[in-house]
Image: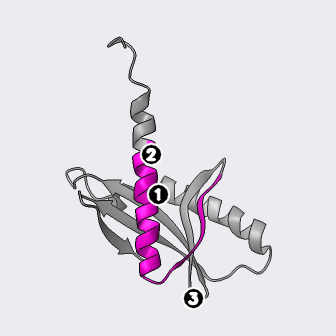
Amino acid sequence: MSDFFPDARIPQQKRRYGEGIEQQAEQWLMQQGLQPIERNYGIRAGEIDLIMQQGQVLVFVEVRYRADDQHGSGAESITYQKQRKLRKTAEHYLQKHFANTPPDCRFDVISASGNPVQFEWIENAF
């Protein structure tokens, strides 16, 4: 492959690695007592990595991975614009599945870092 054309496999490898981190985060949250509902719920406005349930509360989870904290934690990378997209996607999910009787819900963040991966769980992050 020429140096002029980037290797198309790199984004695909990153995506697969990210999916693996999300699966590990889901398993870790299940060990903490949450029940999985859906993974990678997406609409044009955005995507929610994990939708889980803790008791009667529906939990929308954003998973962020950083190999190191040189450029901040995964949680610090969630901008106001990203939060807005997550809220809009969650509103769509709630309307589609619960119409006018949505359950209590919250937004959590799983900030993953290192190798082996360590998880920091931020409940009710925004």
Dot 2 falls on a residue whose secondary structure is: helix
Name the spot of residue 23 as percent of width and height, x first: 46, 61
Specify whether 30 is left or right of 118.
right
Q: Amino acid at mark 1?
A: Tyr
Q: Which residue is mark 3?
A: 55
Q: Nearer the viewer, mark 3 or mark 2?
A: 2
Q: Nearer the viewer, mark 1 or mark 3?
A: 3
Name the spot of residue 77 as percent of width and height, x first: 36, 55
Q: Which residue is mark 2?
A: 16
What span is colored magenta in the figure? 15-42
The Cα–Cα distance between marks 1 and 3, rounded to whole angstroms, is 28 Å
- Residue at 47 percent across and 84 percent down: it is 33
The Cα–Cα distance between marks 2 and 1, rounded to whole angstroms, is 26 Å
Q: Amino acid at mark 3?
A: Gly
Between 77 and 8, which is closer to the camera in this rendering?
8
Dot 1 falls on a residue whose secondary structure is: helix
**Pointers 3 and 2 in contact (CB under 8 A)?**
no
Q: Is residue 25 magenta?
A: yes
**Pointers 2 and 1 in contact (CB under 8 A)?**
no
Pick whichever of labels 1 and 3 is earlier in the sequence.
3
Q: Which mark is residue 80?
A: 1
- Residue at 58 percent across and 54 percent down: it is 47
